[in-house]
Image: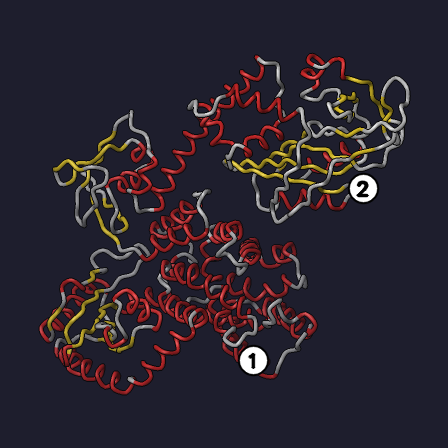
Amino acid sequence: MIKTTYAEKREMADCIQALRPIARALLSGEELEEVRGLKKGLAQSEANCRDAHGLHKALTALKTARVFAEAIDADRNILIAIGLLPALTDETIGITDIRRRWGDDVASLLTGISQVERFSSRNNAVNQDNFRGLMVSLADDIRVIIIMIVRNLVLMRSINNHPDQEWVKNVAFEAGCLYAQLAHRLGLYKIKGELEDLSLKYTNREIYVSIARKLNETKRSRDAYIKSFIDPLRERLEDADLKFDIKGRTKSISSIWNKMKKQKVDIQGIYDLFAIRVILDSEPEKEKSDCWLAYSILADMYTANPARMRDWISIPKSNGYESLHATVMGPGSKWVEVQFRTRRMDLVAEKGLAAHWRYKGVKSDSTDQWMANVRDILETADSGPMQLMKDMKMDVYGKEVFAFTPKGDLFRLSEGATVLDFAFQIHTNVGCHCTGAVVNGVHRKITYRIANGDTVEILTSSSQTPKSDWLGIVVSSKARNKIRQSLNEERQHRATLGREMLMRRAKNRKVELDEALMMKLIKKQGYSHALDFFADMADEKVDAGKFISAYIAETTRAAETVTVSAGGFHLTPVPDQEETSSDVMVIGEKNINGLNYRFARCCNPIYGDPVFGFISSDGMVKIHKADCPNALHIRQRYPYRVIKAGWSGRSGMLLSATFRVTGKDDIGILANITSIISKESNINMRNISVDSTDGVFQGIITVGISDTASLNALMRKIKTVKGVKDVARI
């Protein structure tokens, strides 16, 4: 392990120096001493000062606290949580001690950060569970989102020359696809731009270097052009007695690259490469009028492009962003974008709206709505990470349109939103029963795309229900997820009917269906989800009688165990146990030596179970449990092939036993169950099959175990796991 370098010590000293006045203003003397003690302890712990990727943990925490205080806000609880994170990670201090000393809020923040770090940077691009776990964790507390955005920025700044390039690309992917989007949505535009630039740098360094080199080559001429544009504008604004600051900038490298790809041109072809920002010192009541006055002065000087006009002053963005954007033809026939905003608007745009109201305990409808929207995106249980990212990007970067109800209520929608999106925005029930709308007095279909200023009256019918093709009509994640949820509920209803139909038919034929074997047979028929199978049975696409016949045929021959992976476990199938002597079993009225037997897979008997033997066509004796689901069928149809069997009195041989575990589908429940099994000395995990529907977890687990007493003890232990509702042998 590399110890703290001289350069790192210098960086830590610089961060502490910058944070000292902030800490003194926020913390009491006693609290300051306690923080210093923890920092000192971490500094002396050279053996454990770095994380798994070689980054200095204490330095990362200090950098994060500094960036947060400078770029967003100086918040006591957040800065304490950031500072205590290395100590919590090293177990120098526990969460209980933190809650007692620093309060529930700090402990809650640290718990949220720790939860996110369990999933972050673990190849989320291909691992759906990790990505969903990360998103769910983020969606719990908006402050955790902001902390993780800043931590990700610090991380991205620190890994430029890191030797593990695969990990660097994974971090960069996560930064570009997730954290940059979240930063944009929260109005943290400066952080968003830097994250996107660094993400491009690490994932496509050749493009990044090429654009950066071209920008550097033209910097002198570009600066001269910006000055020639700004100077006359400054004079005209001063003549109007406006107080302001004005500055010019070049668009970010990632923004230039996106425009180059979109417009299919080289950097010379980007017409709005320049951007000028005018920040006005205005009284609250004159903010809008001053911005429009400044714009009118600009429009008198240069020709404006109406198609590029963006008015976020009259109706701000949902994240609180307010600004007036205009694109004009500058000297030399070059397009220049000019942004007008007040000092207050610029503060919100630079640091994000959340930094100014959320930490002060003030409610905000816009961010509460956005948090609800994040959760709506997460409700799509059957979509993978790329679809989740697509939904996030659509809701984050999408332009907005505004429409009214007949009563005058204003609704904000993504550009391209349809009548159906509008209906679901009003209420889920309205969306589910929508048949069309009256838009500006004209009847429109559900596919009609809303325009700015439309007045929309939704038409509904009680007989209308969501259709699968609706998913191709809507553009908002909220509407899409509500449609999927409704379709899943309908499928669940039909599946319930199909299962009841199968059970009635099986009862009529006096066949008791074993759940594990039935699920295996369903998968053999090409169904990945049992719900689809039972729904098709309700629709008479699957014949219940033929399925039962296939089930009976399956139980009369040895079933091969299919290996299923779940929760990271990859289990190797165990071959059938076959004995050539009566070491464990006593078969027949007398002990018949040399008789081959095999334990039946349909019921998996173990030592202690009442059993009987069944002589198969090849002369092998199959040992079944007395209450085997197939016992009645075997005794009725083949009574002459049934033979008495019992245990010899010697246990110790590991035999297969299967049981079902059901409960709440919580993160970590499977890991807890398998951990209990792995700790048992005479029990081996052999097979596991997991299914989750509507938040209900169901696992079919097969273990190698010696006797019924051990099995019952194991099942009792598993019942104690948090979230487990029932454990039953099958």
What's the residue at 56%, 74% (across, down)?
163
Q: Which residue is mark 2?
A: 682
The residue closer to the viewer here, 87 or 305, is 305
Left or right of residue 491: residue 610? right
- Disc 1 residue type? Ala
Placement of 467 over or under 202, stated as above or below: above
The residue closer to the viewer here, 340 or 496, is 496
The answer to whether one can see residue 697 in this image is: yes
Looking at the rendered structure, the number of numbered marks drawn on it comes to 2
Give the foreground label among 1 and 2. Answer: 2
Which quadrant is home to the C terminus? top right
When asked about the image quadrant of residue 220, the answer is bottom left
- Disc 2 residue type? Asn
Report if the CB atoms under discs 1 and 2 are less than 8 Å apart: no
Which structural element holds mark 2? loop
The residue closer to the viewer here, 588 or 316, is 588
**Callout 2 crowding tier (Cα within 10 Å): few <14, some 14–19, many ≥20:** some
Left or right of residue 97: residue 259? left
What's the residue at 22%, 49% (across, down)?
402
Q: Which residue is mark 1?
A: 13
- Residue 150: give x, y in percent of width and height: 46, 66
Which quadrant is home to the N terminus? bottom right
Mark sitting earlier along the chain (1/2): 1
Q: Residue furthest front?
A: 618
When asked about the image quadrant of residue 517, the answer is top right
**Callout 1 crowding tier (Cα within 10 Å): few <14, some 14–19, many ≥20:** some
The answer to whether one can see residue 716 in this image is: no
- Residue 28: give x, y in percent of width and height: 56, 67
Left or right of residue 8: residue 139? left
